[in-house]
Amino acid sequence: MNRTVLIALLVVLGAAGVLLKSSLFTVHQAQQALVVQFGDPRRVITEPGLHFKVPMIQDVIYFDKRILGLDAQPEEILTTDRRRLVVDSFVRYRIVDPLLYYQSVRNEALLRNNLAPSVANALRGAFGKLDAIAIVSGDRPAAMQAVSNVLEVDAKRLGIDIVDVRIKRADFPEAIGQAIFRRMQTEREREAKEQRATGFELSEKIRADAERQRTVLLADARKQSEILRGEGDASRTKIFADAANQDPEFYAFYRSLQAYSKSLQQSDTTMILSPDSEFFRYFMESPGAKPKR
């Protein structure tokens, strides 16, 4: 009997332990919880710690308190200058009302389906008032604030708070982007050709100027050399004339020796002259004798 009672007591204690364990749950400081009973919300728990629920009847759904991100689908926007841009954006939000969030969307997939149209409409409404240059260059803080203000209205009915809206990429569609790239490439090639032509023209001018300066320098140098050569010849002639005037007889003898040397250089030279020719005067005269006039 005692043994049966002991077993029954152990069974009761075990069942009580299981019930107690299933009735306790913890909420992390980065979480908030919603207690539901057969899918019907009962209470919201935002304070971290140990909490109780009815076992096997109530369930706990956790939601994050931290800032969450939602990537929106890229949207094609028509700007004021009639250009099409593809804008890729994302939204940062925080769940501030778990009960309303559970009742309206329940999870992130349904939140995306509900919020994506609002994001697209807000982007078209705000960015459709700007031109392409302002959007691509990043000059869009007022437009981003307008998008945030529009989304705040839809966010309140979903139980979330919009923290920020950012643009990841704003660019032309791929087909238009390729056409723009080709046009820019053609423009850069044209500018490169103009620069090369300008450089070639400048190089030709520099080369022609250098050639002209070279010609002028050579002409001046040649002129100066001719002047110096003429002055040298004149000085030489004057020196010879002065030397000849000092001793005319010796000068005549010296000139005769030069004539002999030049005319008798080759061994096969044949000269036919009269014996009493003036050319042989110094051969026929004895040393110290005066030549005949």
Image (tube, helix red, strand yellow):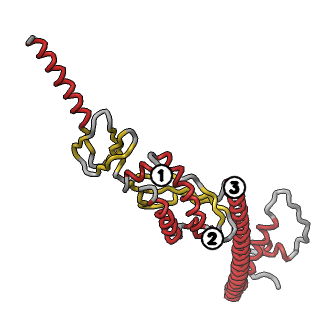
Q: Residues within 10 Å of mark 2 (few under 14, many from 20)?
A: some
Q: Secondary structure at mark 1?
A: strand
C-alpha gap between disc 3 and disc 2:
20 Å
Q: Residues within 10 Å of mark 1 (few under 14, many from 20)?
A: some
Query: Where does label 3 land, which residue?
Result: 178
Nearer to me, 189 or 85: 85
Residue type (three-letter) at the residue carrying disc 2: Asp
In the rendering, at what x and y percent does residue 191 appear?
70, 67
Query: Where does label 1 land, which residue?
Result: 70
Q: Earlier in the sequence, mark 1 or mark 3?
A: 1
C-alpha gap between disc 1 and disc 3:
30 Å
On the question of residue 287 being in view, the answer is: no
Q: Earlier in the sequence, mark 2 or mark 1?
A: 1
* Relative to 126, 36 lies left or right: left
Residue mark closest to the camera, 1 vs 3: 1
Query: Where does label 2 land, which residue?
Result: 131
Seen in the picture, residue 70 relative to 23 is either above or below; the reply is below
